[in-house]
Amino acid sequence: MFQRRRKKGNSSMPTTSADTSLTEETESLLTTVPLDIENGGAGSSAGGAAGVKSAPPPPTPPPPQSARADALRLVFGAGGIYAAFLYYGSLQEDVFRYTSEDGTPFDQAWFLQFLEALANVCVGFVGMKVAGSTKNIPQKFFIISGASQVSSKAFTSLSLARGLSFPVATLAKSGKMAPVMAGQLLLGGASYSTREYLQVAAIIGGTAVLSMGKKKGGVSTSTPLGVMFILLSLFMDGVTAGVQKRLKADLGKVGVKPKPYDFMFWTNLYMMCVALTTAMILGEVSSGMAYCSANPEIFSLIVKFSVCSAIGQSFIFYTVATFDPLVCSTVTTTRKIFSVLLSIFTKGHNLSSSGWAGISLAIGGILSEIQAKYSASRARHYKSKVSM
């Protein structure tokens, strides 16, 4: 499934202001990991005579049959991501809105993350057996990255369990570039354009307007404890981004290039271990099992939620392996917009005019970010053509 390789281009996935993962979207797991899905480097083009640069040949349009095949692959990959993660988001909201007959809600977030990671470990293991695995992968930063990622996902779940509305949580997670930028500015000496600051400000500002706004009935769309947990989730996203840069450098030093399912298996394995350990310490394993035993309906939701996560991550791998990572990033980012709108129209979120204004501002920032990424990608592509 993942034998096709791009001939040239950036060998690593860009750090999302989205997600990966995959997560949230939790898909954010894969779009934030610096995957190298190629077996070789970018290679070098053959030149003409020594000291002479030949003009680049005019681009040859792909044959109609190849273009149709690529279109079908894109529909397959993007359709799989949309289907899996739109349903994933809907199920996540249903899990934390569920209450038993005696009025007790489900709030065992770490137990939920253990089950989700377990499903991904199983799919990742099968994928490694089918597509092959990589030996001698350094594990240190996989452990740290797995711990920070599962913490981010658990805090997102806890924000929902503590009353934060799904649209607010999802839009807030789309602004995860803010802690990443802060970390790079303070620790890495990075610089950003005015447009990048404005994009992040639009996403955060729009989310804040939505969070502080009221529903038509006068009820707030968020709670202080829910806001605290989503801020903790964003903080862990910033930690994850820094760890993953170290992971990429660490892999480069030892000359190891893990395959996609290596990342899926090892990252989720450590996520599962951290989630299980935390759930056991908090007593969520026994209480979670007891709650699911007494309420089979929610266990069914959790199983479908976990399966959707694993299937969605597999489609992300397929899309990244078949197309440029920017294509996958665009699909996963726009998916979040549709998740917010789907939740509003199907879960009874009656927003006020200020709430809609906040959503519009945040979505505008997200779309501007996508457009900027495409412009930068086209500029790099043109520059590489000219320098050939």
Image (tube, grey):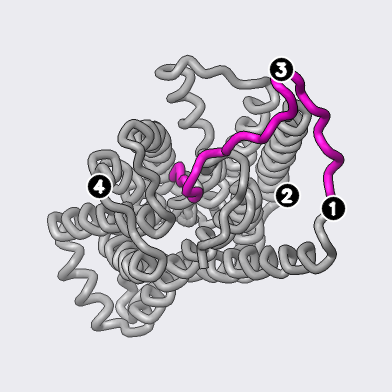
Question: Which residue is tagged 3?
Answer: 51
Question: Which residue is tagged 4?
Answer: 136
Please provide percent x and percent y for residue 317: 51, 59
- Which of the 4 quarters of the picture holds residue 200? top right
Give the residue displayed 53% in from the left and 35% down from the top.
177
Q: Earlier in the sequence, mark 4 or mark 2?
A: 4
Three-letter amino acid code at disc 1?
A: Pro
Is label 3 or label 2 in front? 3
Circle 2 Cα neighbour tier, 10 Å, few/some/many (<14 / 14–19 / ≥20): some
Question: Which residue is tagged 1?
Answer: 61
Q: Please say whether residue 344 is one of the residues in the magenta stretch.
A: no
| Label 1 close to label 2 by CB (< 8 Å) | no
Tell me if residue 65 comes above or below residue 264 in the rendering. below
**What is the number of the mark on residue 313?**
none
Three-letter amino acid code at disc 4?
A: Asn
| Label 3 close to label 1 by CB (< 8 Å) | no
Give the residue displayed 35% in from the left and 38% down from the top.
255
Disc 3, SS: loop
Q: Earlier in the sequence, mark 4 or mark 3?
A: 3
